Structures are given as structure tokens and as C-alpha cells.
């Protein structure tokens, strides 16, 4: 169950905290990758775990960004069907 708790932690983070964590994870991933390539790191599965963790962080960042964009992209005009019915009523009152 550690996977779901890690994802839950990412969901609870603010965007700025998540950005900071992603940058730190990228640096850690590069260190682990280099260690595996130079055969200093014996635990090669650690590289896979760290990549997966970074992917989860980026996925959560994308989800939060999309949610923010959806929240700010509310239509500022009246929908066409409502607008056409109000135009008809306005034209009948003018005549």
C-alpha cells in the first residue's frame, strides 16, 4: 500500500511544493542513473522505483494544472441558444 499513500501525498501538495519535489526527484534520479551506469549502485531496481515516482509526480502535476485551467476557463458569454432567445424577445419589445 505505499503506492497509494505516496499518490495521496502528491495530491495533498500545493503546486509550488510539487514543483520543488519534482526538481529534487529529477536530481535524485540522475544521481541514481549515473551510479547504476558506473556500477557504484548495486540496487538497479531503485532506478525503476525512482522513475516511477517521478512519473507519478508529473502525472499529478498535470492533473492539477488541467483542473486549474478548467476552473479558470469558464465561459464569459451567454450560450448561443440562450442568447438567440433573448435577442428574439428584445426585438419584439422594440417594435
Image: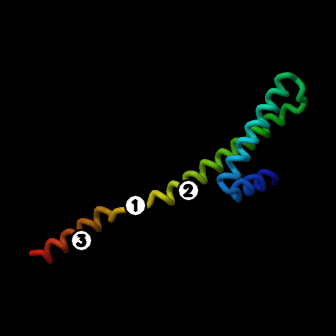
The answer to whether residue 35 is left or right of residue 95 is: right
Residues at discs 3 and 2 in contact (Cβ within 8 Å): no
Label 1 element class:
loop
Measure the C-alpha gap from mark 3 to mark 2. Answer: 32 Å
Measure the C-alpha gap from mark 1 to mark 3. Answer: 17 Å
Quadrant housing the N terminus = bottom right
Q: Residues within 10 Å of mark 3 (few under 14, many from 20)?
A: few
Quadrant housing the C terminus = bottom left
Say which residue appears at 60% left-offset and 48% top-offset.
Answer: 62
Residues at discs 1 and 3 in contact (Cβ within 8 Å): no
Q: Residues within 10 Å of mark 2 (few under 14, many from 20)?
A: few
Residue 3 in the image: x percent, y percent? 78, 51
Residue 5 in the image: x percent, y percent? 78, 56
What residue sits right under mark 3 in the picture? 86
What residue sits right under mark 2 in the picture? 67
Label whose residue precedes the other's in the sequence (3 or 2): 2
Label whose residue precedes the other's in the sequence (2 or 1): 2
What residue sits right under mark 1 in the picture? 75
Label 3 element class:
helix
Say which residue appears at 83% left-offset and 36% top-offset.
Answer: 46
Please tell me in which quadrant of the rendered image residue 76 appears.
bottom left
Measure the C-alpha gap from mark 2 to mark 1. Answer: 15 Å
Label 2 element class:
helix
Relative height, residue 17 to residue 55 (above, below) = below
Amino acid at each position: 500500500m505505499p503506492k497509494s499513500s505516496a499518490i495521496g501525498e502528491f495530491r495533498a501538495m500545493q503546486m509550488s511544493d510539487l514543483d520543488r519535489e519534482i526538481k529534487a526527484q529529477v536530481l535524485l534520479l540522475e544521481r541514481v542513473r549515473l551510479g547504476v551506469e558506473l556500477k557504484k549502485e548495486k540496487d538497479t531496481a531503485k532506478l525503476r522505483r525512482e522513475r516511477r515516482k517521478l512519473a507519478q509526480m508529473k502525472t499529478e502535476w498535470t492533473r492539477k494544472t488541467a483542473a486549474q485551467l478548467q476552473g479558470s476557463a469558464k465561459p464569459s458569454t451567454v450560450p448561443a441558444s440562450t442568447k438567440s432567445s433573448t435577442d428574439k424577445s428584445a426585438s419584439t419589445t422594440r417594435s
